Amino acid sequence: MESIATTVATDEALPARRGLRRDVAERLIVAIFQGAHREGDRLVVQKLAEGLGVSPTPVREALVQLAGIGLVKLLPHRGAVCRQFGPRQLREMYQIRCVLEAEATRNACGRLPEQALRELRREMIRLGDTVETDPQWFDRAMAADVELHELITRHCENDRLADEIGRYDDLMQAIRRVADNFCNVQLRALNEHIEIIDALLSKDREAAALRMSEHIDSTASGVEKVIFGEAECPQRKQL
């Protein structure tokens, strides 16, 4: 039987294929977070493909990606098996992201286009003023969130660092979707992003890196409450 790791399509660089693979990866990550797949469960490519309405190829690609970030394990002759996922594993993932993105922020400080930072800051101020009135608020806030993190990564001038951050993109996107704004996770992130931008505009490398580190740690705490229900919040996410 052909192993998952050796059947990744050679045309993955094509935008359409890459977009499909990322969509499949995000949906599988959300399913793991919601408990649809538990530790030890076999993730059968054909069955997953049928359930997601896609061909087996993007599923194989997505499983290889999930193995790279520690959510599944690829076993010889058995394919993919879901690994344990709980508060500890979530914290470990965020710890890795914290190290990577704090360093990227430090490197990017002073290299980022000031106009782009100021425009993002204005957008985040607007979002803070419309949280109760804009029906599209979460999507807009998430887009601004992604834009800031990607802007920093693009200007960190370290390709290996940027590639490592990129490995966790789909994971972070799925977490954002699961967490939504429950427990005010996204609203709190908005205010933290403004603090990061202010430090970047001041060209204070250490302050910017510290604000990013604090932001990621804060997000990890909020997401942990939403996913694992360790504390009550005004709007509890029913997974």
Image (cartoon, grey):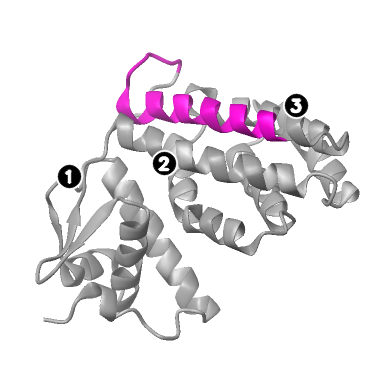
* Secondary structure category for the residue under label 2: helix
Tell me the tag on residue 93.
2
Q: Residue furthest bottom?
A: 10
Residue 78 percent across, percent down from the top left:
10, 67
Q: Secondary structure at mark 3?
A: helix
Q: Nearer the viewer, mark 3 or mark 2?
A: 2
Q: What label sits on residue 223 in the rendered view? A: none
Three-letter amino acid code at disc 1? Arg
Q: Earlier in the sequence, mark 3 or mark 2?
A: 2
The picture quadrant where one finds residue 125 is top right
Where is residue 95? Give x, y as percent.
46, 36
* The label number, if any, that marks residue 129 in the structure image: 3
Of helix, strand and loop, which mostly describes the magenta segment?
helix
Judging by the rendered image, the residue that carries numbered circle 1 is: 38
Q: Position of residue 112 (x, y in %)?
A: 82, 50
Magenta-tinted stretch = 209-234
| Image location of residue 57, percent across then percent down | 31, 78
Is 22 in the magenta?
no
